[in-house]
Image: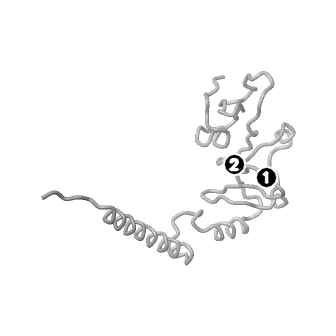
Amino acid sequence: MTDRITQSMLSTTLLADLQTITDKLARTQGKLSSGKEIQKPSDDPFATARALAVLPPGTAVRLYTCSQGWCNVAVSQLGGYLLEEFLTSQAPQAATSQGRGYINSQGEWVPSPTRTADGKPPSGATAHCRDGTFSFSHTRQGTCSHHGGVAEWVRE
């Protein structure tokens, strides 16, 4: 006797699988919306926003980009947006006169990645990013993360 898979059998199996996935999605959405199962900050963006809103003055944050008055920032494991007017630069005056920058995870001011007219690394550059910019990062972790990753490390 030969068993044959019919179109009806395939359809029934496919519908059962689809129902299982739909049920799992509904359970997950229920857990997230009720707050009963939050595994990382991005699972609950409202809680993350509340936590960022009550940061003590002077807290060092990593600044990614600003647009229309809102800045994309990260602090420890939290990431979100803050109004630009609430951010102040704690960088030394000599450093800020050189241009834009950010406070790294060690609390040090680091110049933002930059391009050079001749494509040669500027003084103090540690990495050449894939988008053509040069990074001044003090650690390897996260270097060029918003610039396509590291194309090559610069040797001084």
Residue situated in front as seen by the camera: 75 or 56: 75
What residue is rendered at 70% in x and 65% in y? 52
What residue is rendered at 37% in x and 65% in y? 11
- Would you name the residue on which mark 2 appears? 107
What residue is rendered at 51% in x and 65% in y? 39
The colour mode here is one colour
User: Residue 82 placed where, x, y %?
Assistant: 76, 61
User: Residue 85 placed where, x, y %?
Assistant: 85, 60
User: Residue 73 placed where, x, y %?
Assistant: 71, 55
SS assignment at label 1: strand
Residue situated in front as seen by the camera: 79 or 97: 79
Residue situated in front as seen by the camera: 89 or 53: 53
Quadrant in which the C terminus appears: top right
Mark 1 and mark 2 lie on one chain; the one further toward the N terminus is 1
Kind of residue sitting beneath label 1: Cys
How far apart are the two marked residues, 1 and 2, measured between alpha carbons? 20 Å
Q: Which quadrant holds residue 12?
A: bottom left
**107 relative to 152 in the view: left or right:** right
- Would you name the residue on which mark 1 appears? 66
Residue situated in front as seen by the camera: 134 or 8: 8
Kind of residue sitting beneath label 2: Gly
What residue is rendered at 67% in x and 68% in y? 51
